[in-house]
Amino acid sequence: MRHGRRRITWKGSLLVVGGVVAGCALVTTVPQETVVETPFVVEGAVGETLDLTYADLTVTEVRVADTLESFSEAAQAGGTFVVVDATWRATQGATSFVGAEITDAEGRTFWPTDQAGCSTSAKAQPGYAWHVTYCFDVPKDALAGATVRLARGGQTEEHAGQRRDAAGVVDLGISAEDAKTLWEATETVTTESPGYATARAEGSEE
Amino acid sequence: MKHARNGSPDIAFRVGRRVVSAVADDMSTMQRVGAGVVAALVAVTPFGAWSKVEAQADPVVAGTAIEVGPFDLTVVRAVKTGDLGYLTPAPGNHMLALVVDVTNTSDVPEYSSTLGSAIPAPRGVDVVPQESLTDLATNLDTDLDTDPGAGAGTEPGAEPSPSASPEDESEAEEPELPPASIVNVADATTMRILNPGVTYQVALIWQQSDEFTGSEIPVEVVGLDWIDESRLTLDNGYWLPGEVAFQGDVPLKDNTDRTPAPEDQQ
């Protein structure tokens, strides 16, 4: 008499093979890396305050300029400068906000300049709103439908610094008609240094 | 009806086949493969198979656009002058500027240093070399270069520089020329980012000795190769300078006698 020996049955084999196939199917079909690594994008419009968990972000104003002026230098656009005024209110702790880029309707990306007092990043303590001006030199065909993406993580290496983190994407509200008018206008914007936001600059909710 | 044959090629083929049969009959398959490879290598030798491939650089012509990596470039002119914006030459030197129209044709921004790596300082025209660490140590009156144990900053176990090979000794002795300072011609501000689709006129600027009196400078434009992931450093996605892709002599305009107007100096 044999003790403890189990017979291999068709049902048992099918169960094992079925489990393996189901596991493989799950691993293959579910885009696990994308799910884990994609930033949590919070979308909004100019004047709207976005909750990014680590900060409240408000894009307060969007302007276009051929020339930027500060107390120390003037910068001339190769295309045209899109000047984005924003306020950051850190909600958890002292935070550096490194990510800033514009994406156009074609998917091209544009980084901000540090010319003429414009900022490419910001750092704020919690508890108050910090005003920043970002300036992006873009070509004419990038204006219509452009969005600005602001976050504490950097955008280099395919937004590697924003993985598993929140990023705010704000529609600049520029239509094709607006783009034509804005491109033809010759404006000069005098930039403000980063600093405490006034009630006006902090957005409509304040 | 059989056609008449030309006898000599047929005989040569038969003799060749017999020779090959005589040699190969006693060989194993591996030996035959090896012998075949050796025979192929010997056969391609007379045709320059082992000669170093010399890349032929296309000409650089002022006013003609060229494509390098993510950039469309047009060399506009070369100028030597005194002060250029915030850049001031040391006594005995002047500034050498290569003016270039550049458009980033890719979908992503590029650093201006990528453009700088594509256009190195012109060689053989007295561009002031980069101050080396040894020079700095000498100037600061330190003993970095006198203590062999200190190795003048060489890390223990560091790999020797590729340029230190004996065959490159003559090149290694040439002073290293500095990368260009890149300035936007429109407003004399430093260019750091070149966004897609925007055309800038920039000046690549070096210091040049007043001893140079030539009327043209040799301009080399290095090809840029896209590296998805470096096997050496595991860095992702960057442009790597490669071989010289374009070269030519560009006329040099002398503006050193121009002095800035008093209002420009403010």
Image (tube, helix red, strand yellow):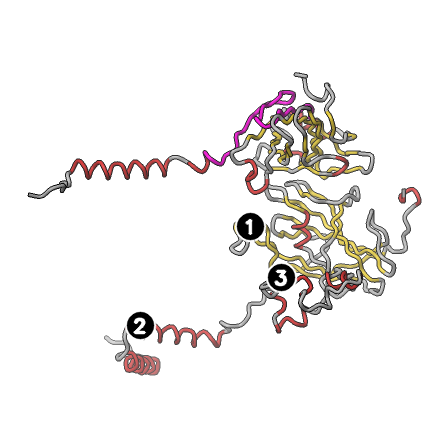
Q: Is residue B70 left or right of residue B124?
A: left
Are the residues at dot 2 and dot 3 in contact (C-beta closer than 8 Å)?
no
Q: Position of residue B238 (x, y in %)?
A: 58, 49
Question: Label 2 belongs to which residue?
Answer: B30
Q: Position of residue A21 (x, y in %)?
A: 28, 38
Q: Residues within 10 Å of mark 2 (few under 14, many from 20)?
A: few
Q: Which span is picked out in magenta?
A: A35-62
User: In what element is the residue under mark 3?
Assistant: loop
Asked whether A56 or A3 is in front, the reply is A3
Asked whether A149 or A87 is in front, the reply is A87
Where does the C terminus of chain A fall, quadrant-wise? top right
Tag 3 subunit = B
Q: Position of residue B252 (x, y in %)?
A: 80, 58
- Cα distance between the residues tagged 2 and 3: 48 Å
Q: Residues within 10 Å of mark 1 (few under 14, many from 20)?
A: few
In this view, the residue farthest toward the right is B262
Please report the residue visible at 72 percent of the width from the left and 44 percent of the height from the top. Answer: B200
> What's under tag 3, amino acid-wise?
Glu
- Cα distance between the residues tagged 1 and 3: 22 Å
Where does the N terminus of chain A fall, quadrant-wise? top left
User: In what element is the residue under mark 2?
Assistant: helix
Q: Position of residue B197 (x, y in %)?
A: 64, 40
The mark nearer the N terminus, 1 or 3, is 3
> What's under tag 2, amino acid-wise?
Met
Dominant secondary structure of the magenta stretch? strand
Q: Nearer the viewer, mark 1 or mark 3?
A: 3
> What's under tag 1, amino acid-wise?
Asp
Question: Label 1 belongs to which residue?
Answer: B235
Residue A177, quarter of the rendered image: top right
Q: Is residue A175 visible?
A: no
Question: Label 3 belongs to which residue?
Answer: B155
